[in-house]
Image (cartoon, grey):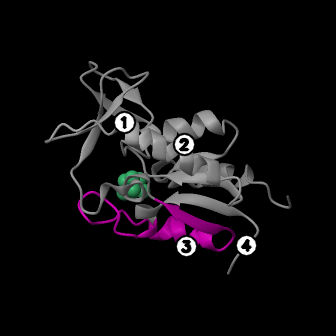
Amino acid sequence: MDTPITIGISACLLGKNTRYDGGNRQEPLLVETLRQSVTLMPLCPEAECGLGIPREPMRLEGDPENPRLMTTVSRRDLTGPMRNWCLHRLDTLPDKGVSGLILKARSPSCGKRVVVQGAGENAYSPGLFARLVMERFPSLPIADEEELRDPARLADFLARLPWGG
Ligand code: SF4
């Protein structure tokens, strides 16, 4: 059933096989709960920007304020292509009526708080897509699936959506 509120969600959380290893990280309880009241719109920065499925794993490295997105074996720097794709994709979100985002925790693209390699202990950054979306839409409700396993945080996230326009 289509509902007036649309939430973007990392595609792997919906059960789509978009991860680097060709698998997913489906969150069935969360998804079924949300589907009762919102429309879920899948997005996958890494697959949609053309990196393929499966693909080489990647991680954040360097300066936590401006980390690079690097593949772990071939050492390709994907920061530029991913950033360009993200900026283009973010332009489309208002037209799609996206009122909030649920992002895969700890992903170097989607995660809200991701370990940065080579920056010492306890160095974290948002994933590349997450950082750009938070910069572009600072008031957009954004959560990850680990936060939303807590019923109180799920209720808080839902309360921030623009019910009734
Ligand atoms: S975490 Fe994000 S980039 Fe990785 S598979 Fe899921 S949706 Fe795609």
**Residue 56 percent location from the top left of the image:** 21, 51
Q: Secondary structure at mark 3?
A: helix
Mark with earlier residue (3, 1) = 3
The quadrant of the image that shows the C terminus is bottom right
Residue drawn at point x = 55 percent, y = 73 percent: 32
How far is mark 3 from mark 4, CA to CA? Answer: 14 Å
Marked residue nearer the N-terminal end (4 or 2): 4
Residue 31, horizontal then vertical, whole percent? 53, 68
* Amino acid beneath label 2: Leu
- Residue, disc 3: 32
Find the distance from the CA under tag 3 to the CA under tag 1.
Answer: 34 Å
Q: Which residue is mark 4?
A: 3
Residue linked to disc 2: 87
Number of marks in picture: 4
Q: Which mark is residue 129?
A: none
Q: Nearer the viewer, mark 3 or mark 1?
A: 1
Taking 143 as reference, is 47 left or right?
A: left
Seen in the image, is 161 located left or right of residue 66?
right
Q: Between 151 and 46, which is closer to the camera in this rendering? A: 46
SS class, disc 2: helix
Please check the rendered image and state whether residue 31 is part of the magenta-colored stretch, yes or no.
yes
Residue at horizontal 54%, vertical 42%?
87
Chain part drawn in magenta: 14-43
Is residue 37 in the magenta section?
yes
Q: Mark 1 highlights which residue?
A: 79
Badge 1 element = helix
Which quadrant of the picture is home to ligand 1?
bottom left
Q: Amino acid at mark 1?
A: Thr
Q: Does mark 4's beta carbon lie closer than 8 Å to ligand 1?
A: no
